[in-house]
Image: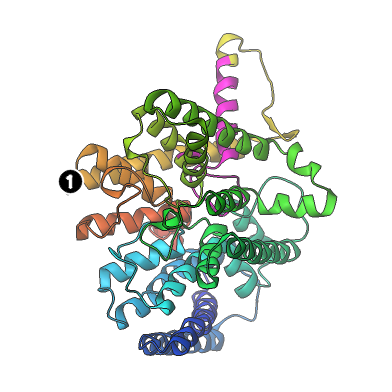
C-alpha cells in the first residue's frame, strides 16, 4: 500500500469536507446563531488537517498516480472513518452533544440511518439541523463522492473495487465509462433532490423544511427537523409526495441513466426494479387488508398507513405512523422489508433486491440438483448468466450479514437489553433504517441507550453502510503488508 498516496487523498477528502462546513456557518450567520463559531472552528480544523495531509502525501508519494485496489480499499474505509470524526466537531463545539453522542449523530448522518440521539429537535438551531441533513445527503452518494471528487484517475483497479466493494451505484448491466457514469449519477441525484424540494414546498412545507427533507429523502436517510418526523404534517399530500421520492430513491440510479438514454421501457424490463416495485405493492396491499380485518381500519386509512410505513421501512425510515400496535405478522413483514432494502445502485442499505433474487435462484437450483444431479441450468438475471464467483460472493455476503445481525443482538443482550429490543435495534442499525421496534420504535429516539449500546450501534451502522468488507479488510495483517501487489 502506498501510504503517502493514501494520506494525500485523505487530505483532499478533509479539505473538501471543510469547504462544505461553510454552508451551515453562513446559515448560522444569516439567522444570528452563535453556533456559527462551532462551524468556523470545525472548518478550520478540517482544512488545516487536510492541507498538511496533502502536502505530506505529495512530498513522498510515487510519481505513479494510478491507485491499486489495495489503495482504493484503504481510502474508502479510512476516508469514511475520517469524515465521521471530522463531522463530529460541530456537535461537540456547539455544546449540543458530548463526544460519544456527537460521534453517534455523525455516523447516523453519513451512514443514512434515521436514528438520532437528540431527544428534542425543537430547540436546535437552523445551522445544526441543516448540517444533520447535509451529512445524510453526502452519505447517500457514498463511494461516488470519493471516486469522482477525489480519485479522478484511479484506473481499472479502482473500477474493480467500485464494483466489488459497493452495490450502491453499481450493477451487472452495461455501463458507460466510470467517470461519465458517475457524473451522470451525481446530476440525477442533484436533480431528484431539487425536484423533491420543489414538490415538498408545493405540498405545504416551508422552504427550510422542504430542503432538509428533500436531502434526507433522496439519500434515504430519514432525518427530520421535527420530533414527529413526517407525522408533524398529518397530511396525505405530504405523505404521498414523500412516498413517491422514497420509492424513486430505492431504485437503481444507473438504471435511471439508461432509462434517460433509451426510454422508460428500460425500467420495466429490469428484473430487479420490477421485483422491487412488486414487493412494495404486495406488502402495502397485504398490510392494508390485514389492518382492515384485524384493527377495523377503513380501507382508505389502511392504504395510507400501509403504503407509507412499508416504503419507509424499506428505504428512508421516516416516521408518520406508529406500527408498534400492529399484529406481529405485520411487523414481520416490516422486518423483511428492512432486510431487503432497495435495488443495487440505490442509496438504501440492507441485503438489496438483486442479492435476494440470486439467493432464491440459488436455493431453487440446489433443490433441482438434489432431485436430478445431471441438471446444469445456469443462473441468470436480466438475461445475463451469473458466474460462480459472483454467486459465491452473494452467499458470503448473506452469511456475514446474518452473522453480524446475530452478533449485535448478542452484544445488546449483554447490556441487559431484552431479546425483542435487541433484535429490533440490531435490524434498525445494520440496515440503517433508523426506526425499529421496542426501544427504538417509530416514536422513540436513540437517546436513552447506554454508552455500550451506542458504541455497538454506531459500529453496526458503519458495517451496514460500507457492506462490511472494506472495514473488515483493515483488521487483516495482509492488508498492511507493504509488499502486497494488489
Q: At 53% from the left edge and 69% from the top edge, which residue is drawn?
A: 206
Using the rendered image of the protein, determine whether residue 435 is visible from the camera's viewpoint. Answer: yes
Tell me which corner region of the image, top left, top right, bottom left or bottom right, holds residue 141.
Answer: bottom right
Outermost residue to the right:
262
Q: Name the image quarter holding the C terminus.
A: bottom right
- On the picture, is 157 further left or further right than 339? right
In this rendering, position of residue 379 left or right of residue 439? right
Foreground: 81 or 288? 288
Magenta stretch: give its range. Answer: 339-367
Relative image position of residue 17 (x, y in whole percent): 50, 79
The answer to which image quadrant residue 417 occupies is top left
Residue 69 lies in the magenta-colored region: no
Residue at 72% in and 39% down: 270
Residue at the location (19% across, 57% down)? Answer: 450
- Inspect the magenta stretch and tell me whether residue 344 lies in it: yes
Q: Looking at this view, is 391 or 207 the one in front?
A: 207
Give SS at disc 1. Answer: loop
Residue drawn at x 37%, y 49% is 435
Q: Which residue in the protein does label 1 denote? A: 414
Extreme-top residue of the structure = 371
Q: Quadrant of residue 200?
A: bottom right
Where residue 134 sits: x, y (%)? 50, 71
Left or right of 383 in this view: 235: left
Residue 95 vertical position relative to residue 105 in the rendered view, above or below: below
Residue 60 vs 412, above or below: the answer is: below
Observer able to see residue 483: no
Choose between 225 and 156: the one closer to the eye. 225
In the depicted view, which residue is nearer to us: 82 or 196?
A: 196
Residue 245: % across, % down: 60, 53
At which x and y percent is residue 95?
27, 80
Q: Is residue 156 above or below residue 337?
A: below
Amino acid at each position: 500500500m502506498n501510504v503517502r498516496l493514501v494520506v494525500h487523498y485523505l487530505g483532499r477528502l478533509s479539505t473538501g469536507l471543510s469547504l462544505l462546513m461553510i454552508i451551515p456557518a453562513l446559515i448560522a450567520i444569516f439567522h444570528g446563531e452563535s453556533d456559527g463559531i462551532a462551524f468556523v472552528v470545525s472548518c478550520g480544523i478540517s482544512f488545516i488537517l487536510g492541507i498538511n495531509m496533502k502536502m505530506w502525501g505529495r512530498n513522498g508519494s510515487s510519481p505513479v498516480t494510478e491507485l491499486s485496489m489495495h489503495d482504493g480499499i484503504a481510502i474508502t474505509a479510512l476516508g469514511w472513518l475520517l469524515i465521521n470524526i471530522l463531522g463530529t466537531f460541530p456537535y461537540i463545539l456547539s455544546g449540543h452533544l458530548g463526544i460519544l453522542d456527537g460521534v453517534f449523530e455523525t455516523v447516523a448522518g453519513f451512514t443514512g440511518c434515521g436514528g438520532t440521539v437528540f431527544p428534542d429537535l425543537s430547540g436546535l438551531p437552523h445551522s445544526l439541523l441543516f448540517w444533520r441533513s447535509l451529512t445524510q445527503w453526502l452519505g447517500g452518494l457514498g463511494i461516488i463522492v470519493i471516486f469522482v471528487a477525489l480519485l479522478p484517475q484511479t484506473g481499472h483497479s479502482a473500477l474493480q473495487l467500485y464494483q466489488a466493494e459497493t452495490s450502491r451505484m453499481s450493477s451487472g448491466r452495461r455501463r458507460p465509462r466510470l467517470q461519465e457514469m458517475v457524473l451522470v449519477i451525481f446530476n440525477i441525484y442533484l436533480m431528484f433532490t431539487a425536484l423533491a424540494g420543489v414538490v415538498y414546498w408545493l405540498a405545504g412545507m416551508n422552504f427550510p423544511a422542504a430542503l432538509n427533507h428533500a436531502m434526507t429523502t433522496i439519500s434515504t436517510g430519514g432525518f427530520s427537523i421535527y420530533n414527529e418526523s413526517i407525522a408533524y404534517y398529518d397530511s396525505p399530500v405530504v405523505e404521498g409526495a414523500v412516498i413517491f421520492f422514497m420509492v424513486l430513491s430505492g431504485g437503481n440510479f444507473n438504471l435511471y441513466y439508461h432509462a434517460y438514454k433509451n426510454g422508460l421501457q428500460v425500467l420495466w424490463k429490469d428484473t430487479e426494479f420490477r421485483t422491487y416495485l412488486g414487493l412494495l405493492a404486495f406488502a402495502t396491499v397485504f398490510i392494508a387488508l390485514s389492518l382492515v380485518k384485524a384493527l377495523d381500519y377503513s380501507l382508505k386509512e389502511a392504504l395510507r398507513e400501509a403504503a407509507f410505513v412499508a416504503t419507509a421501512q424499506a428505504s428512508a425510515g421516516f416516521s408518520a405512523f406508529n406500527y408498534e400496535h400492529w399484529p406481529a405478522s405485520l411487523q414481520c413483514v416490516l422486518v423483511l422489508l428492512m432486510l431487503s432494502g432497495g435495488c443495487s445502485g440505490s442509496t438504501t442499505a440492507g441485503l438489496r433486491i438483486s442479492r435476494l433474487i440470486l439467493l432464491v435462484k440459488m436455493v431453487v437450483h440446489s433443490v433441482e440438483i438434489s432431485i436430478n444431479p445431471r441438471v446444469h441450468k445456469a443462473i441468470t438475471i436480466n438475461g445475463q448468466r451469473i458466474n460462480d464467483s459472483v454467486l459465491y460472493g452473494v452467499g458470503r455476503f448473506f452469511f456475514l450479514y446474518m452473522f453480524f445481525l446475530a452478533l449485535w443482538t448478542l452484544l445488546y443482550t449483554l447490556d441487559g437489553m431484552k431479546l425483542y429490543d435487541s433484535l429490533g435495534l440490531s435490524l434498525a442499525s445494520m440496515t440503517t433504517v433508523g426506526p425499529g421496534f421496542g426501544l427504538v420504535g417509530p416514536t422513540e429516539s436513540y437517546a436513552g441507550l447506554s454508552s455500550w449500546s451506542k458504541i455497538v450501534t454506531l459500529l453496526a451502522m458503519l458495517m451496514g453502510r460500507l457492506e462490511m468488507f472494506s472495514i473488515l479488510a483493515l483488521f487483516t495483517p495482509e492488508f498492511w503488508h507493504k509488499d502486497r501487489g494488489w
